[in-house]
Image (tube, rainbow, N blue to C red):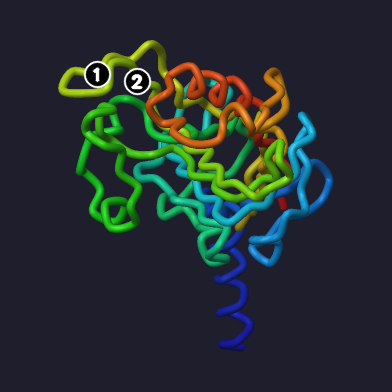
Amino acid sequence: MLTIVFLSCESDQDDERSSTAVQFRFEHHWDNIGVSNADFNSIKFTNAFGNNLSIERLRYLISRITFTKPSGESLVLDGYKLIDLSENESLQFTTETPIDLGTYTNVSFIFGFTNEDNTDGSYADLNSTSWNVPAMLGGGYHYMQLDGKFLNTLNSEAGYNYHAIRAADNPGANPTFPQDTFFRVDLGEISISDNSTITIAMNIAQWFKDPHLWDLNVYNQMLMPNSAAQILMYQNGQNAFNLVSVE
């Protein structure tokens, strides 16, 4: 009888649960082909321009995960997450803040940091991972580091560093910022049930494709002080992420 009573009470508590932790999972693709760190260091990808390339590192930062209710009320989660394809444990995480069950008109996150959050030297863990941006470019932190090799016009391997940061002009003591290059990723309407998992995919190929065909012979290194290149990255990144599933 005690066992029956206990199970009954436990069932009642489950029925009354109104919030849950939500897990986020990040997948990576090159168009329709899955990409993992097992694919690193091999020239096996071809971008839309026709450059043959490898991936040696891919990591990027997301922040301000936001759940927007039909009423317009928004829950903005504190903190940020550095996604590193070389570290499988970084590809998923669970919210510390419980999320109310129900349907949200939109779930979104910021790619990188907003200008308000992008405060130089503020995040000890990011400081220790060489994520900082030099003071001459305004300081703060990277949004993404995508590195590898490509075959240049001489069919020789050359390095590329596709690094996204806040676009800056006039490097030096007083840099200026032509436009914001962080952006919001909208996943659309999502229904949250108990222990939901939201799976998101990045199409790495998109960074080289649309609306700007990316020729690595032209834009390969020294892109951080190149505000025009940073704005092209910002525009290409708009469609790099998509919602895969909610389970």
Q: Quadrant of residue 219?
A: top right
Residue 91 locus on image (x, y percent): 57, 58
Residue in view at x 53 percent, y 66 percent: 89
Q: Quadrant of residue 57?
A: bottom right
Q: Mark 2, residues whose alpha carbon is within 10 Å: few (<14), some, or many (≥20)?
A: many
| Mark 2 residue type | Ala
Residue 147 locus on image (x, y percent): 55, 48
As drawn, 147 above or below 136: below
Residue annotated with mark 2: 168
Q: Mark 1, residues whose alpha carbon is within 10 Å: few (<14), some, or many (≥20)?
A: some
As drawn, 164 above or below 6: above
Residue in view at x 45 percent, y 43 percent: 61
Q: Is residue 93 left or right of residue 118?
A: right
Between 104 and 39, the residue placed more toward the observer is 39
Residue 96 locus on image (x, y percent): 41, 55
Residue in view at x 25 percent, y 33 percent: 139
Residue 174 visible at all = yes
C-alpha separation, residue under disc 1 versus residue under disc 2: 6 Å
**Are circles 1 and 2 on residues that touch, CB within 8 Å?**
yes
Q: Is residue 106 left or right of residue 76?
A: right
Residue 43 locus on image (x, y percent): 73, 54
Q: For the N terminus, which image quadrant?
A: bottom right
Secondary element under disc 1, as helix, strand or loop, is loop
Between 68 and 225, the residue placed more toward the observer is 225
Q: Is residue 232 left or right of residue 42?
A: left
Instruction: Residue lying at the far left in this picture: please name it.
Output: 173
Label number found at residue 129 = none
Residue annotated with mark 1: 175
Q: How many marks?
A: 2
